[in-house]
Image (cartoon, helix red, strand yellow):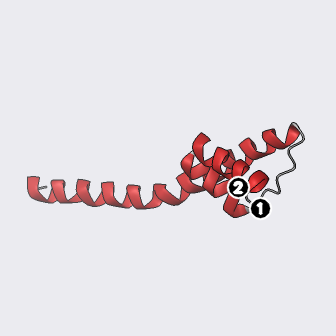
Amino acid sequence: MEPLSLVAAVVILFIVIKLLSLPIKLLWNGIIGAIILWVVNLFGVGIKITVIKALIAGFFGIPGAAAVIIWDLFLK
């Protein structure tokens, strides 16, 4: 195998892995976001957990969860 074709194959493999890992990462982060909101609900806050709220909390992490909580409690 020529070195140029080997480099091309590695680059294409890297791109395919990156494209396939993004949906899995978003799904995992959405699950984590839902868990954070669920734990907050254990303390009696009463936030309705939706897919959008879970994805916001999961994508942005703790600041996203805080934003969802503040939005639901004070700005709704």
Q: What residue did someone put label 2 on?
A: 71
The location of residue 32, given as percent across then percent down, is 67, 45
Q: Is residue 46 visible?
A: yes
Image coordinates of residue 72 in percent, x first then y, are 76, 55
Which residue shows up at 56% across the image and 52% down it?
A: 59
Using residue 56 as the reference point, say whether residue 45 is left or right of it: right
For marks 1 and 2, the one nearer the N-term is 2
The residue lying at 66 percent from left, 44 percent from top is 66
Direction from residue 41 to residue 62 in the image, left or right = left
Quadrant that contains the N terminus:
bottom left
Can you name the residue that lies furthest to the right here?
A: 44
Residue 54: quadrant of the picture:
bottom right
The residue closer to the viewer here, 67 or 54, is 67
Assess disc 1: are there few (<14), some (14-19) or many (≥20) residues with their C-alpha within 10 Å of its C-alpha: few
Residue at (17, 54) in percent of width and height: 6
Q: Secondary structure at mark 2?
A: helix
Q: Which residue is mark 1?
A: 76
Which residue of the protein is positioned furthest toward the front in this rendering?
74
Distance from label 1 to label 2 (Cα)? 6 Å
* Front position in the image: 63 or 57: 63
Location of residue 39 by image quarter: top right
Counting from the top left corner in percent of width and height, residue 62 is at: 61, 40
